[in-house]
Amino acid sequence: MTTTRSVLLFALAAVLEIGGAWLVWQGLRERRGLAWVGAGVLALGLYGFVAALQPHAQFGRVLAAYGGVFVVGSLLWGAVLDGYRPDRFDVAGAALCLVGAAVIVYAPRSG
């Protein structure tokens, strides 16, 4: 159950952080207004709380592993919302990042 909870928290953190950054981008770069920027700032703040809910106690390890989730989530977000089509190198790099994230946070450790 701990692994499932952790994976779900990583996914929620990615939605909040990537979504928040996207909202700020839309508000500023696409001129959608300050309400979009404000919603983005709120989402980014919530991301920090969700990241802190991870069952793992080591901040550096959690954030390092989250980096892999962020890479994959960013490519998916771009594909779904911006029409970006990742190429095979994007996919290969994202897969490597995700495998690395899993090793960092879920590898069995002694002690």
Image: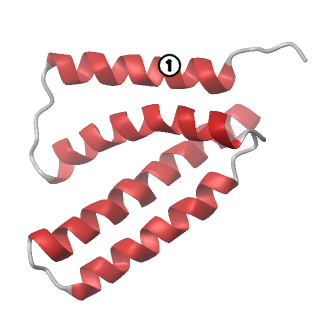
Q: Is residue 111 left or right of residue 6?
A: right
Q: Is residue 86 left or right of residue 46?
A: left
From this viewpoint, is residue 1 visible?
Answer: no
- Residue situated furthest front in the rendering: 60
Which sits in the foreground, 75 or 4?
A: 75
From this viewpoint, is residue 109 visible?
Answer: yes
Q: Image point 44% across, 69% down: which residue? A: 43
Q: Is 41 located above or below residue 48 in the figure?
A: below
| Disc 1 target residue | 100
Where, by quadrant of the figure, is residue 103 drawn?
top right
Q: Image point 17% across, 42% down: which residue? A: 79
Q: Is 33 located above or below residue 71 in the figure?
A: below
Q: Image point 69% across, 16% down: which residue? A: 107
Q: Position of residue 83 (x, y in %)?
A: 9, 46
Q: Amino acid at mark 1?
A: Gly
Q: How many marks?
A: 1
Task: Pick the quarter of the image with the N terminus.
Answer: top right
Where, by quadrant of the figure, is residue 32 drawn?
bottom left
Q: Image point 78% across, 41% down: which residue? A: 57
Q: How was this image coloured?
A: secondary structure
Q: Position of residue 41 (x, y in %)?
A: 40, 74
Local SS, label 1: helix
The 10 Å Cα crowd at callout 1, few under 14, some 14 to 19, many 20 or more, is some
- Residue situated furthest right in the rendering: 111
Q: Is residue 98 left or right of residue 91?
A: right
Q: Position of residue 97 (x, y in %)?
A: 41, 23
Task: Pick the quarter of the image with the C terminus.
Answer: top right
Q: Is 9 located above or below residue 90 in the figure?
A: below
Q: Position of residue 29 (x, y in %)?
A: 11, 69
